[in-house]
Image (cartoon, rainbow, N blue to C red):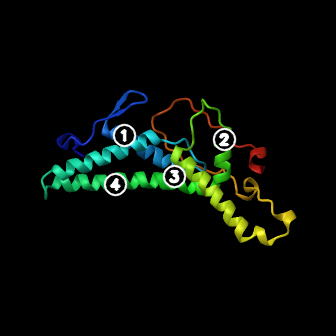
């Protein structure tokens, strides 16, 4: 991809004052996307990466509108924009699916975290999770709980909604060669549990 020719990227991460190249920014987005996609639990949010990518996509669209029509480079850049949009929307979609699936546990985890700890939810995701919780409670109360005896009308979403299976298998890829790594064999006690 020839970003330099159309001057499509130039991004600064204001929080760390680190200048990221377009390739680094897209690589971080792809890494966050794959990690989120294959993780059984909701990971720390990467809202700064999402915001940077969205700004860059807008900037790239504006630059493409000024470029010559019918040029092969424009077509290739447009395909790259669509690829990046797909990765971004898939990342956000997988986060929302996990929030919908495990909403009471995620909200509980978010409320119990220390102020110094990184947030697992962005502000928008937190608002969505709270609204989704309220809507589910209202729906369940209107649909079924009002038709059962009053002593059974208690709704505990923490017990009703399954927790994320953090003991599930995950796949990983080694990014760089590591020396002296010891993987201990599984014992009988570990197999039985």
Disc 4 from disc 1: Cα separation: 14 Å
- Whether residue 115 appears in this view of the structure is yes
Farthest right residue in view: 151
Q: Viewer-nearest of labels 3 and 2? A: 2
User: Along the polypeptide, which appears first: circle 3 or circle 2?
Assistant: 3
Q: Residues within 10 Å of mark 2 (few under 14, many from 20)?
A: few
127 to 183, vertically: above or below = below
Where does residue 70 sit, x and y in percent of width and height? Answer: 13, 59
Q: Which mark is residue 25?
A: 1
Mark 1 and mark 2 in contact? Answer it, CB < 8 Å. Answer: no
In-front residue for pair 148/33: 148
User: Along the polypeptide, which appears first: circle 4 or circle 2?
Assistant: 4
User: Along the polypeptide, which appears first: circle 1 or circle 2?
Assistant: 1
User: Along the polypeptide, which appears first: circle 1 or circle 3?
Assistant: 1
Q: Viewer-nearest of labels 1 and 2? A: 2
Q: Residues within 10 Å of mark 1 (few under 14, many from 20)?
A: many
Disc 3 from disc 4: Cα separation: 16 Å
Mark 4 and mark 2 in contact? Answer it, CB < 8 Å. Answer: no
Where does residue 49 sit, x and y in percent of width and height? Answer: 42, 41
In-front residue for pair 138/120: 138
Q: Which residue is mark 2?
A: 111
193 to 140, vertically: above or below = above
Q: Secondary structure at mark 1?
A: helix
Question: In the visual, does 4 lie left or right of 47?
Answer: left
Mark 3 and mark 2 in contact? Answer it, CB < 8 Å. Answer: no
19 to 189, vertically: above or below = above
Q: Residues within 10 Å of mark 3 (few under 14, many from 20)?
A: some
Disc 1 from disc 3: Cα separation: 18 Å
Write the residue at 44% across / 39% down. 48
Disc 4 from disc 2: Cα separation: 35 Å
Where does residue 174 sit, x and y in percent of width and height? Answer: 49, 40
């Amino acid at each position: 991809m020839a970003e330099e020719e159309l001057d499509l990227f130039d991004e600064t991460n204001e929080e760390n004052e680190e200048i990221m190249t377009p390739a680094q920014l897209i690589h971080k987005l792809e890494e966050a996307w794959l990690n989120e996609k294959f993780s059984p639990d909701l990971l720390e949010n990467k809202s700064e990466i999402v915001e940077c990518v969205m700004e860059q996509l807008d900037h790239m669209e504006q630059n493409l509108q000024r470029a010559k029509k019918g040029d092969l480079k424009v077509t290739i850049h447009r395909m790259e924009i669509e690829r990046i949009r797909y990765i971004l929307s898939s990342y956000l979609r997988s986060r929302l699916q996990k929030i919908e699936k495990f909403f009471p546990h995620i909200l509980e985890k978010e409320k119990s975290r220390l102020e110094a700890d990184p947030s697992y939810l962005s502000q928008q995701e937190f608002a969505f999770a709270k609204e989704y919780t309220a809507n589910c409670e209202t729906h369940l109360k209107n649909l079924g709980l009002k038709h059962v005896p009053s002593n059974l009308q208690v709704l505990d979403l923490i017990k009703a909604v399954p927790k994320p299976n953090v003991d599930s298998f995950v796949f990983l890829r080694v990014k760089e060669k590591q020396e002296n790594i010891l993987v201990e064999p599984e014992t009988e006690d570990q197999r039985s549990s």
